[in-house]
Amino acid sequence: MSINSPITQKVLPLVARAEPDELSLWCEHLSQALAPTHTVKLLAELSVDECQAAEVAIVANPDPKDLQSLPNLKWVQSLWAGVEHMAAELPQDGPAIVRMIDPQMANTMSEAVLAWTLYLHRDMPRYAKQQSTKIWREHALELPSDRTVTVLGLGNLGKRSALRLKANGFTVCGWSRSAKTIEGVETHSGADGLAKVLSKTDIAVLLMPLTDDTRGLINEQALAHMPKGASLINFARGPIIDDTALIAALDSGQINHAVLDVFASEPLSESNPYWSHPSVTVLPHISAPTIHSTAAKIVAENVAAFAQTGKVPESVDRQRGY
């Protein structure tokens, strides 16, 4: 997408549903990265003329009604990698959505994937339970090469995570909706490929986007394909897992342990059974937080390129949702 008129916008609206402290941090980092050519203001601080002039907005979980006050938007720069909610909420003919693609985020995610894979591999949940009942007992340790870890979703985050697991000695498989190749990683694709790879997976790591195809993908049938006593880590999106099916699989021992960082509704309600389930580790969506300083530089680069060329950065496929 491109435009023919010169780019004159100097004030960039920040449209986000976030706490005041978080908004203040973003304004600080973005203003530093975009100076001296642009300034950043919260939507409520914009004049009528500034709202009319805005062709670009910086967003994080924006209220669609707020974006309606910017009638000439051509694209929005998300501060997050996940944009499925925005893609669903904004009209199909609305502004283009540009995801946050930050190499640092891939590194941060791969670090979290390795950390929590090791947590399961080294049987930390079992030792935590032993401590709670004052049991001193050693258990046999498998080699990483004897443990098959499957990364479900082989985009930028998934590929980096698969390679990091491989570098640490694990036997690594990968799965994606369409066929992909990663050196040293056995890859599968499609429905048949999912069943095949799950059947030999000791630890499944979910990193795929939430789409119509992946919603509820990890259901009773998928969990039954896994070897009894396998574990899983969900660093993707909550609705990819059928919660009822997972709890049943945990109760039966089909799934040994689940590390869950994302949920269908966040924050997780106090009444949610995951909190107290003995085979679940609950994390407050911390696997790969956006780093303010590095993300602000990405935003500045995209805005500068648009100001110079009039060309919108690569944007989300609204049909696929990513």
Image (cartoon, helix red, strand yellow):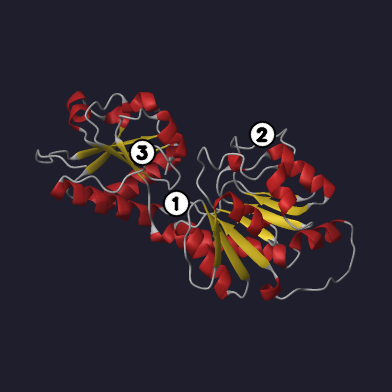
- What residue sits 76% from the left and 64% below the top? 123
- What residue sits 42% from the left and 29% below the top? 89
Q: CA distance from mark 2 to mark 1?
A: 24 Å
Return the residue at label 1. Answer: 290
Kindly indicate whether the residue at mark 3 contacts the one at mark 2 (C-beta within 8 angstroms).
no
Per the image, label 3 sits on a secondary structure element best described as: strand
Residue 59's tag is 3
Tag 3: Cα neighbours inside 10 Å, few (<14), some, or many (≥20)?
many
Which amino acid is tagged 2? Ser
Where is residue 29? Give x, y as percent: 33, 50
Per the image, label 1 sits on a secondary structure element best described as: loop
- What residue sits 61% from the left and 43% below the top? 217
| Residue 276 visible within the image | no
Where is residue 306? Give x, y as percent: 19, 47
> Mark 2 vs mark 3: which is more N-terminal?
3
Which amino acid is tagged 1? Thr
